[in-house]
Amino acid sequence: MDAILQTEDLCVEYRTRGLKAEFKPALQELNLSVHAGEVFGFLGPNGAGKTTTINVLLGFIPPTRGTAYLFGIDVRQPIARQRIGYLPEMTYYYKFLTVEELLRFYAKIFKLPSADAERRIDYLLKLVELEPARKRLIKTYSKGMQQRVGIAQALINNPDLLVLDEPTSGLDPLGRMKVREIIQRLKNDGKTVFFSSHELGEVETVCDRVAIINQGELKTLGRVDELVARHGANLEKVFLDIVGYQSQPAL
Amino acid sequence: MNTVWALTGIVIKELYRRKDFYVLFVLTALITLAAGSVEFFKDPNIVRYVKDLCMLLIWVSALLITIATAARQIPAERESRTIFPLLAKPVTRGQVILGKFFGCWLASGTALAVFYLFFAVITGSREQHWPVLDYLQAYLLQWIMLGIVTAMTLLGSIVFAAPSSTVTILFIVVAGILFLGRHLNTVALHNPEPLRGIIYTVYFIIPHVELFDVRERVVNDWGLVNWLDCGLAALYAAAYTALFLLLTWLAFRRKSLN
């Protein structure tokens, strides 16, 4: 099977500030491959290196060593991002624009023909239920609505790979359900989804495979059902075992 | 180029939706209106002096608008984190810089055009004299000069930590070049080595934005500058603008965004 997303011995080191500057590893020789049509969960505790990995994949930070590919193209080349959609953890959009203007702007970046862009914008605004608010400035939206703007912009180019960075973080149950439905719909359409999350129940429900990282190191990688069967427990227990969590004795 | 124009459109849209942009604009327009309307004892020297003041005000306001706009572009994208969904698309950092540059340059050009139009209408209606080509030439030269300032400010916004420091430093540098730039070679002659060499180096390195200042000609009605000289000045400005944009790209292209 072709790998849509691949990392080879990916390392990222940060230089600490101060008089005694040191190099602190954020990612250590990460090897991952995500195949076409699968929903891949990328798990780890806070500070494990999930967002760093996504930042390298999207070209925000250069790797210290190793390489990463999207659709076989080195991520340092912008064309590697032509067929992906990205939903950041928080809502970072031009708040002086309306959602319609924002989507039109991103459609121009993807060089969508004008008529196709308008059709796509109409479809996405209906999908994320922002049709009645399409002429309002984004700064007047609630947090949930802004998150839905994020979903719409991530799908503007009908991406083959969707990268979601903790997509349900801070959302109410309805918002979470909406995101889950969209992931399921993309999966049914044969799209590939790569997402980092803390919601292990959600990951167990929608993911085909998961990778768990801790302190920048890949701890395990495999099919969700196999991991669960091997450990004889649910994904949450598997996760806690792998990251070495030990419960405190009762006070 | 499609991406660059899309980014340019966003910069312009942001400017006209931000209210603070209009404050300086209205203030300059009001002062120009007031000063241009006054006829002090019908003395031509005083009228010329007032016109000179109005032109100076247009220069200062245009510089302030340009520097303040360009200085906040990239830092604001990073601070509000809108740069992340943008760069997650097939957009290069070079395109971001070019889009920001054209957006700021077009916006400052539009503001400048309105200032000149206002000035021309006020003075023309008082004096019944319409040197349209003089105003057009002065406008074009100043706008070309603002291209260099925009590119310098974008570089400053990558190098300096905060937009406020970029604005302060760039305004001082540009004002310094405007007032002292043409005298630096004379100053160098009156100094011993090695100071003379240093001042000469500075004289030959800095972009001489004062070359684009034809206020005196407009105020005193000295006629047009040769258009060929204007063309050469435009090439000079294009070379400096390209250099500053290249330096901005070199500073920004490998910068970690997190």
Image: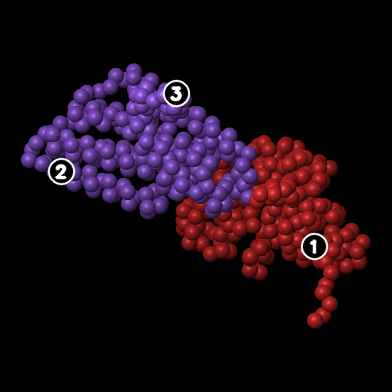
Chain colours: A red, B purple
| Image quarter (top left, top right, bottom left or bottom right) of the C terminus of chain A | bottom right
- Residue situated in front as seen by the camera: A15 or B9: A15
In the picture, the disc for residue B37 is 2
- From this viewpoint, is residue A54 visible? no
Q: Residue at x 13, y 43 (%)?
A: B38
Q: Would residue B109 be found to the left or right of residue A154 on screen?
A: left
Q: Which residue is mark 1?
A: A204
Q: Position of residue A160 (x, y in %)?
A: 70, 45
Q: Residue at x 72, y 60 (%)?
A: A46
Amino acid type assigned to the residue bearing label 3 in the image: Glu
Q: Residue at x 50, y 57 (%)?
A: A138
| Dot 2 and dot 3 residues touching (CB under 8 Å) | no
Protein chain holding label 2: B
Q: Secondary structure at mark 3?
A: loop
Protein chain holding label 1: A
Task: Indicate which disc, 2 or 3, sits on the residue closer to the N terminus.
Answer: 2
In the picture, the disc for residue A155 is none
Q: Which residue is mark 3?
A: B193
Q: Would residue A189 be found to the left or right of residue B184 on screen?
A: right
Q: Are marks 1 and 2 on the same chain?
A: no
Q: What is the spatial separation of the Cα atoms under label 2 and label 3, in whole angstroms?
A: 52 Å
- Residue situated in front as seen by the camera: A117 or B1: B1
Q: Residue furthest left?
A: B41
Q: Would residue A60 be found to the left or right of residue A33 on screen?
A: left
Q: Residue at x 23, y 27 (%)?
A: B217
Q: Position of residue A82 (x, y in %)?
A: 65, 40
- From this viewpoint, is residue A201 visible? yes
Q: Secondary structure at mark 2?
A: helix
